[in-house]
Image: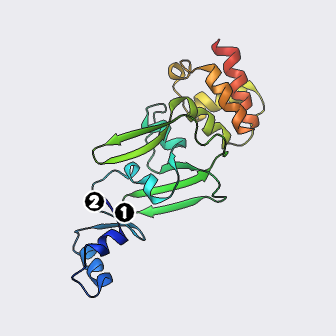
Amino acid sequence: MLITNKVLKENMQNYSNKDTKLSREVKAGKIFKIINGLYETNPNTPGYLLAGSIYGPSYISFEYALSYCGLIPERVSTVTCATFNKKKKKKYDTSFGIFTYRDIQYLAYPEEIILKTEGDYSYQLRHQKKFYVINFYSLEPINNYDNLRNMLFNDLRIDEDEFNKLNVSKVEKLSNLYHSTNVTLLAKYMKRHLN
């Protein structure tokens, strides 16, 4: 269970030096520090369940989301998350894993987010249709369909059958929110090849 520094100290009313007691609890393995001010009671909690609490607002996206949903064959160990208006990338290396956060377009941020629950934890994840868009938004500019196909199916190793199931009109709508050459090219490619 996630627990904040403030709540832990409120539960230590009988101790005169709450910081010392907190340090002892961590050393004894009764609680586990994630980052300053945030702890977990279960050391086996998967990192993706903690990502939104470490830095936010944020949700799981980019490479980790692609791997998590089985859209690429590789296992991705770093939990990659999207943010907005943070203006800089963040990275946290914790005992629960490595977490990275980077901005996307403000208007695109709230689109196609799914809220998932596992036990006492809830987390936000980018919907499948948007994984492709958000990954292309963050790549170096791609200048033609051949390079786009190569990036999709060779470099990113996207499952072509899953890709072919995408709703073209929704991806087109999303492309208008990103103002990105890559995303526009992706939408045009999909309109031409998936209709």
Q: On the picture, is 98 further left or further right than 109?
A: left
Specify the label residue 95 is tagged with.
1
Q: In the rendered structure, which amino acid carries the disc numbered 2? A: Pro
Q: Going by the image, does 189 lie left or right of 126?
A: right
- In the image, residue 1 sits, relative to residue 133, either above or below, namely below
Indicate the quadrant where residue 17 lies. Answer: bottom left
Mark 2 Cα within 10 Å, few/some/many (few <14, many 20+)? Answer: some
Residue 91 lies left or right of residue 46; in this view the side is right
Dot 2 falls on a residue whose secondary structure is loop
* Labels 2 and 1 touching (C-beta < 8 A): yes
The residue depicted at 53 percent of the width and 53 percent of the height is: 57
Residue 172 can be seen in this image: yes
Q: Which mark is residue 146?
A: none
Q: Would you identify the image quadrant in which residue 94 lies?
A: bottom left
Amino acid type indicated by mark 1:
Ser
Distance between mark 2 and mark 1 Cα atoms: 8 Å
In the image, what residue occupies the spot 56% across and 60% down? 90
Between residues 188 and 112, which one lies in front from this camera angle?
112
* Residue of label 2: 43
Q: Who comes first in sequence, dot 2 or dot 1?
A: 2
Vertical position of residue 38 compared to residue 121: above or below: below
